[in-house]
């Protein structure tokens, strides 16, 4: 049984090629520059431009729309390599990935044709918005609402919070309340594809009514912006309801929860990437630091610690890949949560080593 499991985790030739490419990119472009961008809390535009050239914004988008058409497992491998370089880089593409997933699974043919080709190239990037200032994990308590107007468009009013890529994105997949009387409450939510001008703090013209306050200052996770979004009379045509008005109105809770479950795989992969980099730094330090006339890597107690760390990282990686495979086949969703928990345990164990905090820098 173990042999079968190990065989199922072996990389295909395609996966080997793309992960080697991304690892080289991380070694040459991300790691040498991450500390600068993290310290300055500035967006790594040159790195993102190279990610566009490598096609990383279209990894899971079908080839017919200009993407690579790769599966979730391969995407998880790519996220691990990017996070190994700097976790904020994976943050640039993860909400974009969720947006493309929503379009591919729930979007109308017209919506997919309109957005996916430009998303595949990175010409436009996506954000994903559920949370609000007065609520945490209770998604059903959202207050942002959309009301249909006489001309058929919907007017959105409300405030969203902690939106990754909230400023520089061109699209925001936003969850709002469209039926305040629905029981249970989740049956009254709709996902709108809110278009916006990337980089604009105050949208104008047809996009007026969507404003982005200054980015939220964070203790970590620098370089990728987290923002509020303020909807104040923002008008959204009915055709930008995810899935169309007939099929998508008041159906968004299921759509969003589906996307969040898939997103947990990339959260797990990010944990593996951080842990892997921390392990690498710990190994290097153990070979450089000397006590009693020899590197501490030669002391048995240190060897035990390093072996335990390596075991946990490898276990986290295997469970993450297994979860990705199962999610792809729509089975055993519980493994996604399991993988996320184990990965963060592994990364926290590794981060306790000398200099390992630089794994995020």
Image: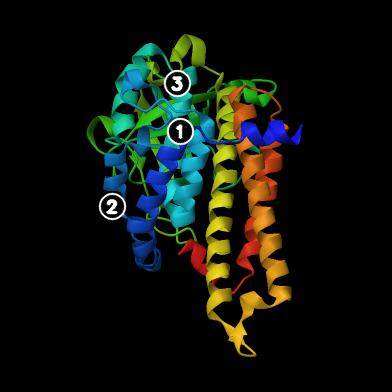
* Residue 323, image x, y percentages: 64, 34
Mark sitting on residue 104: 3
Above or below, comparing residue 16 to residue 116 in the picture: below
Above or below, comparing residue 183 to residue 10 in the picture: above
* Residue 110, image x, y percentages: 34, 13
Q: Tell me the residue that label 1 is attached to.
A: 13
Nearest to N terminus: mark 1 or mark 2: 1
Q: Residue at x 42, y 37 (%)?
A: 96
- In space, the residues marked 2 and 3 are separated at their CA atoms by 27 Å
Q: Tell me the residue that label 2 is attached to.
A: 45
On the picture, is 307 further left or further right than 46? right
- In space, the residues marked 3 and 1 are separated at their CA atoms by 26 Å
On the picture, is 148 further left or further right than 72? left
Proximity of marks 2 and 3: CB atoms separated by less than 8 Å? no
Q: Residue at x 44, y 56 (%)?
A: 85
The quarter of the picture where residue 237 lies is top left
Mark sitting on residue 80: none
């Amino acid at each position: 049984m173990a042999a079968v499991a190990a065989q199922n985790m072996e990389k295909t030739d395609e996966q080997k090629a793309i992960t080697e490419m991304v690892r080289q990119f991380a070694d040459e472009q991300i790691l040498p520059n991450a500390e600068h961008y993290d310290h300055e809390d500035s967006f790594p535009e040159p790195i993102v431009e190279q990610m566009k050239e490598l096609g990383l914004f279209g990894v899971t988008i079908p080839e017919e729309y200009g993407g690579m058409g790769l599966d979730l497992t391969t995407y998880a491998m790519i996220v691990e390599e990017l996070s190994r370089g700097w976790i904020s880089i994976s943050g640039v593409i993860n909400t974009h990935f969720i947006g493309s997933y929503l379009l591919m699974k729930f979007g109308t043919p017209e919506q997919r044709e309109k957005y996916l080709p430009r998303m595949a190239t990175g010409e436009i990037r996506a954000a994903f918005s559920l949370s609000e200032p007065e609520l945490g994990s209770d998604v059903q308590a959202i207050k942002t609402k959309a009301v249909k107007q006489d001309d058929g468009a919907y007017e959105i009013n409300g405030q969203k919070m902690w939106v990754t890529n909230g400023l520089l994105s061109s699209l925001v997949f936003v969850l709002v309340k469209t039926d305040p009387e629905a029981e249970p409450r989740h049956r009254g939510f709709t996902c709108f594809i809110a278009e916006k001008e990337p980089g604009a703090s105050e949208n104008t013209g047809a996009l007026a009514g969507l404003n982005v306050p200054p980015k939220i200052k964070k203790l970590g996770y620098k370089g990728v912006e987290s923002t509020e979004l303020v909807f104040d009379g923002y008008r959204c045509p009915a055709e930008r309801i995810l899935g169309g008005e007939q099929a998508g109105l008041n159906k968004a809770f299921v759509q969003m929860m589906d996307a969040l479950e898939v997103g947990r795989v990339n959260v797990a992969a990010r944990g593996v990437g951080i842990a892997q980099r921390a392990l690498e730094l710990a190994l290097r330090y153990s070979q450089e630091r000397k006590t009693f006339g020899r590197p501490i890597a030669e002391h048995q107690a240190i060897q035990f610690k390093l072996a335990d760390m390596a075991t946990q990282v490898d276990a986290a990686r295997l469970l993450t890949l297994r979860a990705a495979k199962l999610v792809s086949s729509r089975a055993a969703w519980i493994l996604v949560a399991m993988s996320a928990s184990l990965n963060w345990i592994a990364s926290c164990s590794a981060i306790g080593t000398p200099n390992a905090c630089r794994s995020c820098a």
